[in-house]
Structure formats: structure tokens, C-alpha cells
Amino acid sequence: MAAGRVFAFRDARWAPDPVLAPSPAVRSPQPVPLVIDNGSFQTRAGWAAADPSVPAEPLLRFRSLAARSRGARGGAGAETQVGNDLGSPEPLRWLLRSPFDRNVPVQLELQELLLDHVFQRLGVSSQGCVDHPIVLTEAVCNPLYSRQMMSELLFECYQVPKVSYGVDSLYSFYHNRRQNWPCSGLVISSGYQCTHILPVLEGRLDAKNCKRINIGGCQAAVYLQRLLQLKYPGHFAAITLSRMEEILHEHSYIAEDYIEELQKWRSPEYYENNVHKMQLPFSNKLLGSTLTSEEKQERRQQQLRRLQELNARRREEKLQLDQERLDRLLYVQELLEDGHMDQFHKALVELNMDSAEELQSYINKLSLAVEQTKQKILQAEVNIEVDVVDSKPETPDLDPLGSEQSLEDVESINEFEPLFAEDQPEVEKPVATVQPVFNLAEYHQLFLGTERIRAPEIVFQPSLIGEDQAGIAETMQYVLERYPKEQQAILVQNVFLTGGNAMYPGLKARVQKELLEMRPFQSSFQVHLASSPVLDAWYGAREWAVEHMTREEGWITRKDYEEKGGEYLKEHCASNVYVPIRLPKQAPRTTEALAPSRALTSSTGNPCEQV
């Protein structure tokens, strides 16, 4: 909540995902598809059922991260936590692992952990097999090796009946289609790891002219973290990536004109009216500087009492252990005195002793230790009582000589008093507590000025972070110029914005401004924003799964996987374009190459004939 333009970091902890009981409608009359939006930032999973009793929204939403703990000292083994079970990513920042390289899953053992988490929390038994069809999102122009490993994981490990792959941004485009929308368009998808410019012609992706920019929300968070750490080096550790992501999601925006917006921030009035102050957590007491002498004395007494209680507890525990050992040894000695020699020797062996003399020596030592411990406990109790009685400091005797001081000494002191009058401290005045000369709360505030627009600007100007890449505007113009003017006019009539970065305020206006500058004079274009840029990919995949549940279009069956390989893809309206692996044909062996081998065979002959 903001108080005078001051915002506090929420530092929200992730609540662990509950184990959900599947509805009977997802099993009858046949298992319904399970839709998984496998994003590099967040994984979303839910059911695709036409039954209204099944929620038409993702039931699971968690970060695509996993961490393996090192194990406790007590002997517990390492434990792997996934997604929201991590609680907070910052304490485990150096242990976090993701199955993605950019937006392509490459670590399949980590991907298996994410899928196990999805199946377990949705109540799907994955021990024998997962008998639900799977609808899974993949990256644009996904490498065949990545799809092959994913298909192998799904069909071999989970025994799924069939699977369908689709592009998340095309599913979002599919979900937001309207009756008056054309089937063609230019999709701008900006996510956590990268940004894509996807031309769609007649409802199908033109994969040859797709372009990718390796800039996304991850790079913006790292850039913002570096900016603020350079600006506030005293709060280096408190400026974490999680807090930077919170700033990007809630306090950043994209300027319609970046240079003009920077000029506005140079005005002191504009700065005061638009700066956002982020309050870092802090303590009012710094190194005891605000404590009075009475509070310091009370704190010392509390620490002393705690130490005394701790020592007393340890002495009592030691006394109890020594007394138990002494009782055991005395019992063994009684066996010797009563003449039970067999039991006595057996007890000596258990105590790892050789003779009665060694037993007597241990008894003497333990008896002495028990008596000393009892004396220490009694002495400690007496000291505590004395401390309680004499807690007030004694007033020092200012006249140790008493009446024996002569009158001449008093007169000689009075002669020197004027010389030291100025240096005498005023004892009667109380010493005031030193207060800090600065506002402690303001010292722990991050002032967000131009940083609010500098971090998101990298998707339009990657050169701000030293990346030698083109931004969204240049890439969009490059893609459009690869088409004839007639097709360019068709594409710009439906420029569609989706992905997590599409939630930045001002992105739609910025794209419209860039299109206005690059398009011919008086030409028309339309820019549309996804209704829910983050969740529309899952909603579109669900709608596709419900419509194609009983069809064969777009589904890869186990038979297709076994016959055509794991990289095989059945295309549909929201899928990639399948480009099979073409192995080079081996040249046939000529007669000249075969002649030497025949001559060698004839000269060698049958070894049986040479015998």
C-alpha cells in the first residue's frame, strides 16, 4: 500500500500447491485431455472438459524451477522441491535450476520433476501410466531434438495415449479471435526469456519468416537490479531479483517516446509527482546507538541471567548423568561384596573394565565430580541471590579522609578552583540521547525515477544492455518487408500483442507509434492486445483440446511415435511447421570400387582348400 508515494515490498511467499482430487467428470465417459502451458517462467496446468463442473481455468500455477537441498546433518537425505513448494526463491537462489535454455526445454530430468509435480497435485496416478491425452505448449520453431526427448519422456515414461504440441502465442491468438478478425496477422509475443515476431497467413504460421529477439523479462530484471545496485551500493544485498520482478510487474511502464519521456523526468516537479519510493525493511535500532544507559544496563542483566540459567541447566544435566553412572558402578560393587562373582565379572566386561581396583578408582572420581558439581550449583544460587539484592550500584565515598583533612588543605584547593572552573563538567545536567541526523526510513528507500522506463525499454533498444540485436520495431519492419505490399497491408490489420511483457502499460501505444512511423502515409493498421496476456495461451489450448477431443487432427498417437520417431509432429492451426529430418542419400558403390575387393577375394580363395 502506498503512503505518500511510498510503496512497501510485498515479499510474498509462495503457498505450496494442494493435492487436488480430480472430478469424476474428467474420467467419464473417457479421460479428458490435460492441458499444460510449459512456459519458461511459469507452468500452468488444468483440465480441458466440456462439462461445466470442471473448472475452465488452470488449477496449478507455479514457477518452472526446482531445487535440491543438500540434506540435513541428522542423516536425512537430499530433498527436491518444485515450484511453489520452494516458498521463496531468494534463500535458494544459487540452488535453483530450470529445465529451459532460453525458452527451449533441454534438461529433461528437471522437466520430469515438473511433470511429476503436475500429475501429483492434480490427483493423476503416474505410477503405472497417465491415461489422459496431453496438450503441451512448445517454443516457436522448436528443435527436433527437444521435441524428440519430450515425446520420449511422455510416451516411454508416462505411457500417455496421445499428445499434441502447439505454440503458446498461437494458442493465445486462437483464443482471442473474433468474428470480424482476419485469419492473418502479425503476432508479437514477448515473454520471460525472448521475444518473437510471428507472421500468420490464412490461419497458419509462416515459419520461414519468424524472428526471435533474445530479450525478455529476465534480462529486464537483471538490468534493473544492476541499475539500482549501482545507485544504492549500501543496499546491495537487499536489491534482489524477486524484488526487481515485483517492480517490473507493478511500477514499470513503456514510454511512448523514450527520449521525450527522459526530458520530462529532468523537471523537478515531474520527478516529485511521478517518482515511486520503494521501502526496504529496516530496524529502528542500529547497533545500540539509540539505547539509553538504563536500557543497556537492563540488556546486560538479561544476558547475564540467560547465561546463568544456561550454565545451571548444563550443571544439572551433568550432575544427573554422573549420578546415574555412579549408581551403576555402586551396584556393580555391591555384587562383588555380596559374592555374585559371575554377575560381577559380566558387569565388568560390559563396563570395559579389568579389575575391582579400576572400578574403585572410577567410583572415587565420579563421587568427587558429583560433589564438586553440587557445590557449584549451590554457589551459583547464592551468587544469583546476591546479585538480586545488590543490583543497585553503591554510591562512591567522595570523602575517604573524613574529618582528618586539615583546614590548610581546603584553602589550598580553593585557590586552584578558579583555574579549573571552565573545565569542570556540569554533572547535574542529564546527558541527552544522541539522535540520528537522518531519517532512517528514508535511508532505506529506493527512489524509482527513470528506472521505471529504462528497464522495459530494452525490448525496443537491446543496445542499452550491450546486446547487438534489433529491437521490436526494427524486427517488425524487417519481417514486413519480406512480403509484398498487399500482404503487408493484410498483416498490419491485425497486429496482436501477447506474452507477459504485453502487460506493461504503454506497450500498445508504443507499437502503434512505431507502426505509424514505418507504414506509408495514410495507411491503416490495427493493434490488438490479448485479453489476458499471461493466461490466454492456456485458455486457447483448452479450447482447441475441447474442439478436437474426438478428432485425429493434431494428435500424435503412440503408433505414430513408434513408426515415425519422437520428432514427428502433426500440424494444426496453432502448431509449428513440421520439417522432417532429411538424411543424405548414400552414393551407390561403382563397379570400379567393387573390382579390387573381388580380386582380393579370388586371390585369397577358400581357406579350406589351401590345407
Image (cartoon, helix red, strand yellow):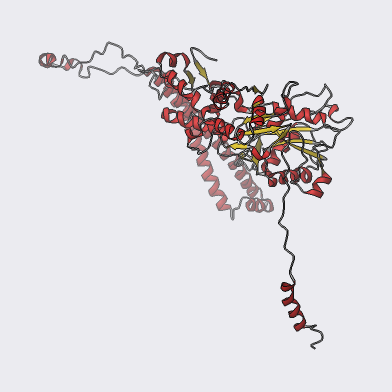
Instruction: Please identify the quarter of the rendering in which residue 533 is found.
Output: top right
Q: At 22% from the left edge and 19% from the top edge, which residue is drawn? A: 400
420 and 180: which is toward the camera: 180
467 and 339: which is toward the camera: 467
507 over 367 or under it: above or below: above
Quarter of the image containing the N terminus? top right
424 over 605 or under it: above or below: above
On the image, the x and y values in percent for residue 171 come to 72, 30
Q: Residue furthest bottom?
A: 611
Residue 147 at least partly seen: yes
Quarter of the image containing the C terminus? bottom right
339 and 16: which is toward the camera: 16
Q: At 72% from the left edge and 63% from the top edge, which residue is drawn? A: 587
On the image, the x and y values in percent for residue 582 come to 72, 52
539 over 418 or under it: above or below: below
**Left or right, 497 with reference to 248:** right
Q: Residue furthest top?
A: 429
Q: How many marks?
A: 0
On the image, the x and y values in percent for residue 454 come to 49, 27
**Left or right, 420 with reference to 506:** left
Instruction: Please identify the quarter of the rendering in which residue 292 is found.
Output: top left
On the image, the x and y values in percent for residue 579 come to 72, 45
